[in-house]
Amino acid sequence: ACLVPSSLPRTFGDLTTMKPWDGIIPEEEQRAYTASGFGRRSGLGERPALLIIDVQYRTTGTRPMPFWDAIKEFPTSCGEVAWKAIPNIQRLLELFRARGWPVLYPHVSPKESFDQGRLADKVPALMTVARQGYDFVAEIKPRDNDVLLPKKHPSAFFGTPLASYLIDLKADTLVVTGCTTSGCVRGSVVDGFAYNFKMLVPSDAVYDRSHVSHAVNLFDMASKYADVMTTTECLDALGRTGQPQG
């Protein structure tokens, strides 16, 4: 990846730092999006909620391992990229705990024989994950009063009461973490955007088994559906908004 030259119009908040998609999305295409008016940051509301999507051992492995070793333990693991994201999810979680802001865990529950469907047709390995793979990673596991949302499809909204919970919590901003960037994260961000929530994606608190898919989907979400920034930037923005909720 190369640094964005000074001649390139600054998108996504006029920041000068490198973006995850630099060196992957051609500069000409980034300029085209900028010229068309895409990528403007929409900012945060006053009542954020944190989504931690599918951070279970089936997507991380029980310890940091290179991808090809990790999939020997769980075929759905993303490998060590997951363990690079987990400390950033922890940082966000600490802030939300301290502020009393809501934390929700959309997750995949253990597959049963009746869970066959189109996704199982596409990815049969999903049906073979051992039960312990569905445990939440200890570093970010839920606490009492966190909302647990079993789901069967990529979007955390599809077929779940997530929207109802968020309305009850009076949330107006969703901080989306977890995996995969190109799958359940993106699906949830698009649907959250459609429900008119302000969407925020910390780019280093989401992960994917494909670096290219990770980068391309972050670029697309930043262009159309969400504010995309680093966890550090996210914490700084959150620190200036909202009120503790008890």
Image (cartoon, rainbow, N blue to C red):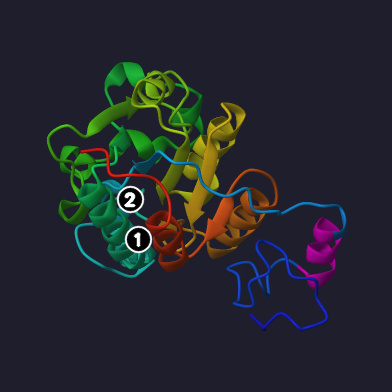
Q: Secondary structure at mark 1?
A: helix
Circles 2, 1 touching at the beta carbon (< 8 Å): yes
Q: Which residues are magenta?
A: 26-34
Circle number at residue 82: 1
**Rendered-image quadrant of the N terminus:** bottom right
Q: Which residue sits at x=42%, y=57%? A: 240
Q: Quadrant of residue 166?
A: top left
* Residue at 25% in and 48% down: 99
Above/below status of 220 relative to 5: above
**Residue 142 among magenta residues:** no
Q: Amino acid at mark 2?
A: Thr
Q: Is residue 196 above or below residue 26?
A: above
What residue would you read off at disc 2?
Answer: 59
The x, y position of residue 121, in whole percent, is 49, 29
Q: Position of residue 87 (x, y in %)?
A: 28, 65
- The total of numbered circles placed on residues is 2
| Picture residue at 70% right of the left edge, 52% below the top | 223
Q: Secondary structure at mark 2?
A: helix
- Relative to residue 43, is residue 206 drawn left or right? left
Is disc 2 surrounded by few (<14), some (14 to 19) or many (20+) residues within 10 Å? Answer: many
Q: Nearer the viewer, residue 118 or 57?
A: 57
Secondary structure mostly seen in the magenta stretch: helix
Residues 111 and 155: in front is 155
In the displayed structure image, the side of residue 135 where residue 40 appears, left or right: right
* Side of 181 relative to 39 (left or right): left
Quadrant containing the C terminus in the rendered view: top left
Q: Amino acid at mark 1?
A: Ala
Point out the frontmost of discs 2 and 1. Answer: 1
